[in-house]
């Protein structure tokens, strides 16, 4: 059955799905595996944990997370993306026991409240405008159990001249004002406004991608 993309005002990447796996290593300057491993380490998931990956693309990170879990004990990594072609690639190349993919918009999740132990997202938030960033964060908060971890890697206030240049060129080359929101530094405030603890920046890659680490409070 042909998968249909979910309507969203986010900038989806159906058109790039067929080349995404070939291009991402260049965008991440050959550090994709290290970067993904860092995210997985921050998530510190194992065994029967249920983990949700927002804007998963072709599912490389989702698969890496699934490899840390135990499907026999109920552990599962779920990747969602609004672009059906991304999910088709992810399913074909990376789905398996404890690793599943759904076509879904991050701002409108169909999962139950408190149904995940951790939520992660890599390079998704600069694809959606402010109100959708807010909705996606409030959905992440809703589906996370109390005490569950949220890890987000995305464009943030540049820390180097090269980072500032890459951010500026990307914003205008891709005609993507959502990038300028990120580089103005909106993410930490939005994360806190959604109810999460104040996020710490665990690392910065390439002078413009920050790794935010936080939790949903226990109460
Ligand atoms: C730059 S890619 C990141 C993919 C992957 N997480 C990674 O790190 O390689 C951004 C992804 O967000 C997806 N996307 C855009 N708007 C979305 C939305 N509202 N809900 C879910 N996914 C969305 C795009 O289709 C795209 O696959």
Image (cartoon, grey):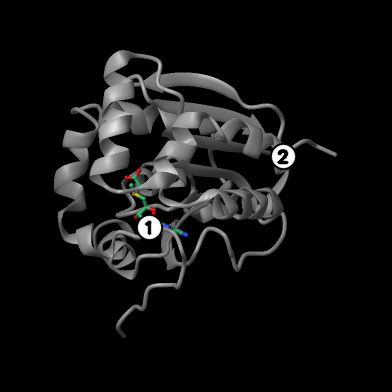
Q: Earlier in the sequence, mark 2 or mark 1?
A: 1
Residue 65 seen anywhere in this rendered image of the structure: no
Measured from the top left, where is residue 24 in percent x and y? 22, 41
Reading the image, the residue beneath label 2 is 193
Q: Name which residue lies at 41% across and 20% down.
A: 204
Q: Residue placed farthest to the top in the image?
A: 160
Q: Nearer the viewer, residue 183 or 95?
A: 183
Q: Secondary structure at mark 1?
A: loop
The structure residue drawn at horizontal position 46% and vertical position 52%, both measured from the top left corner, is: 128
State the residue in front, 51 or 35: 35
Give the image quarter of residue 110: bottom right
Label 2 element class: helix
Residue neighbourhood size for the residue with mark 2, other residues' Cα within 10 Å, grouped as few (<14), some (14–19), many (≥20): some
Are circles 2 and 1 on residues that touch, CB within 8 Å? Answer: no
Q: Locate the N terminus and report the quarter of the image it occupies.
A: bottom left
Q: Is residue 102 left or right of residue 52?
A: left
Q: Which mark is residue 11?
A: 1
- State the image coordinates of residue 55 (x, y, percent, origin top left): 42, 53
User: Residue at left 32%, top 40%?
Assistant: 171
Q: Is residue 98 left or right of residue 146?
A: left
Q: Quadrant of the C terminus?
A: top right
Image mark for residue 216: none
Residue 31 image offset from top left, x and y in percent:
24, 27
């Amino acid at each position: 059955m042909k998968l249909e993309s979910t309507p969203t005002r986010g900038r989806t990447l159906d058109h790039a799905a067929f080349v995404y796996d070939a291009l991402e290593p260049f965008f991440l300057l050959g550090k994709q595996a290290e970067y993904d491993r860092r995210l997985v380490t921050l998530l510190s998931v194992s065994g029967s944990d249920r983990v949700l990956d927002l804007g998963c693309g072709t599912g490389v990170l989702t698969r890496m997370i699934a490899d840390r879990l135990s499907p026999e004990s109920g552990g599962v990594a779920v990747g969602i993306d609004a672009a059906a072609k991304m999910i088709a690639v992810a399913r074909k190349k990376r789905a398996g026991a404890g690793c599943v993919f759904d076509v879904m918009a991050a701002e409108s999740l169909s999962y139950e409240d408190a149904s995940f132990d951790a939520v992660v997202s890599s390079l998704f938030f600069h694809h959606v405008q402010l109100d959708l960033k807010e909705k996606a964060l409030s959905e992440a908060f809703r589906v996370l159990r109390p005490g569950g971890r949220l890890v987000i890697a995305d464009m943030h206030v540049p820390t180097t001249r090269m980072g500032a240049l890459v951010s500026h060129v990307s914003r205008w080359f891709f005609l993507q004002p959502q990038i300028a929101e990120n580089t103005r530094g909106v993410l930490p405030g939005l994360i806190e406004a959604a109810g999460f603890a104040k996020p710490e920046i665990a690392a910065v890659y390439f002078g413009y991608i920050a790794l935010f680490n936080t939790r949903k409070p226990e109460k």
